[in-house]
Image: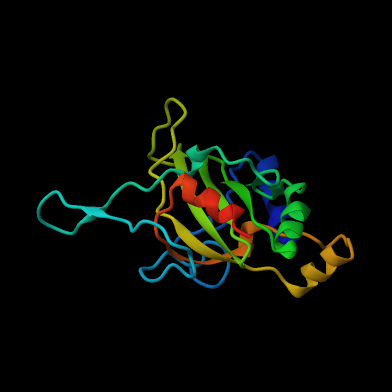
Amino acid sequence: MNKTMISACIVMMALGTACRISLDPIGGAGAGGSGAGGNAPVDGGDGGAGPGPSTTTSSSGGGADAPDPAVDLFACGFELSCQQFYHHAYTYLTDALPCAARLLVGGGTGVLSSLLSIGPYVDETESMIFVLGDGTALVQTREKHCGRPGMECGPPPGWDTLSQHQICDLEISPEVEEACATDGEECSWSPWPGVANCRAAEEHTCEEVAARLEAP
């Protein structure tokens, strides 16, 4: 996001005008490209995901089969390796950026989380990002929306249906790798757009995710 967009947003907010900046959620159906959210999940392989139970389908008779609800990885209780990423308008939670960069450059496994809350309505996307140590991550997202024009907003809404599990690439530049090696200020990584090329993956249970994080 450039400084011009940020300045315009600040002016609009000062005038009492709602400012909404578009930022694709992780794994969402964006407009394309390699950034986070720029690639909608597609049918096919799991991009190197390890063994896991296949996703089953159920049918209510007639028409296409509907996928079973995804395993809720948010409920597994994994401890985060870094503070949660947070983005609202133009504010990032900066403490998470160098922590995640060092995790990825070091080639280890870990658990990251991000919350995209673009506003001015209740319009949130939260993601669990399980770093697998091979340049990819197992990702699941959930969303909540309330208060858009024509949408009544009563009590705070709960989370909508969970996404299916996805495998995504974790992109990190050589410049960031070099900065982390020398403890430079540019040792910084964000899931927007560092999480890219998301595609459908096999379902994982909490135990299977834990095993993959502990694997050498």
Outermost residue on the left side: it is: 62
Image x and y of residue 198, in percent: 49, 65
Q: Is residue 69 left or right of residue 212?
A: left
Q: Is residue 87 left or right of residue 50?
A: right
Q: Looking at the image, which residue is at 72% across and 60% down?
A: 189
Q: Quadrant of residue 132?
A: bottom right
Q: In this view, does 187 lie to the left or right of 202?
A: right
User: So how many labels did they put on this image?
Assistant: 0
- Which part of the image, by quadrant, shows the C terminus? bottom right
Image x and y of residue 151, in percent: 39, 38
Q: Looking at the image, which residue is at 33% across and 46% down?
A: 69
Outermost residue on the top side: it is: 155
Q: How is the image coloured?
A: rainbow
Q: Looking at the image, which residue is at 79% across and 72% down?
A: 175
Does 188 appear above or below 94?
A: below
Q: In this view, does 107 lie to the left or right of 203?
A: right
Looking at the picture, tell me which residue is in the foreground, 86 or 163.
163
- Which part of the image, by quadrant, shows the N terminus? bottom right
Image x and y of residue 123, in percent: 50, 43
Looking at the picture, tell me which residue is in the foreground, 208 or 152.
208
Outermost residue on the front side: it is: 216
Image x and y of residue 153, in percent: 43, 31
Does 169 appear above or below 78?
A: below
Looking at the picture, tell me which residue is in the foreground, 134 or 42.
134
